[in-house]
Amino acid sequence: MFSKDEWTQVELLKNKKLLEKDGIKVIIVDTILKPLDNLEVITYNPYEMNLYPKDTVFVFYCDTGKSTKERLSYYKKKFPNHKCISLKGGRAYFRPNFKLLEELK
């Protein structure tokens, strides 16, 4: 899950669901002041973000995913007690109506 620095939208939704079952918050961080539709996001604010519990996962996104991928080492230094991930493709490839379907038993 944390072996990669980028998550696709599918990985974001799956990992968010799995981690939140274990009590770990996954926070989606808007770095471009354009919130994603149908998801709860916060605007990048280092002071407020440092107030989240230490095991919180921050998923950063921008328009294309390139800027947040390039800045990921900066974010990891800024938030050493948190996991930092970039959203692959950023806002451009985000499908607001995409949902995970539960597998049939």
Image (cartoon, helix red, strand yellow):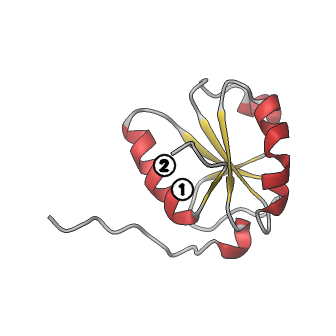
Q: Element under label 1? A: helix
Q: In the image, is residue 18 above or below residue 102?
A: above
Q: Mark 2 belongs to which amino acid?
A: Lys
Question: Label 2: few (<14), some or many (≥20) within 10 Å?
Answer: some
Instruction: Tell me if residue 52 can be seen.
Output: yes
Where does label 1 land, which residue? 12
Q: Report which quarter residue 12 is drawn in.
A: bottom right
**Amino acid type indicated by mark 1:** Leu
Which residue is rendered at x = 44% and y = 41% of the image?
Answer: 19
Note whether 73 is above or below 35 in the view shown.
Answer: above
Q: Residue furthest front?
A: 3
Seen at 58% across and 75% down, the residue is 95
Q: Are marks 1 and 2 in contact (CB under 8 Å)?
A: yes
* Residue 85 rendering spot, x and y as whole percentages: 67, 47
CA distance for labels 1 and 2: 6 Å
Name the residue located 57 percent from the left edge and 73 percent from the top edge. 96
User: In terms of depth relative to the viewer, which is nearer, 9 or 3?
Assistant: 3
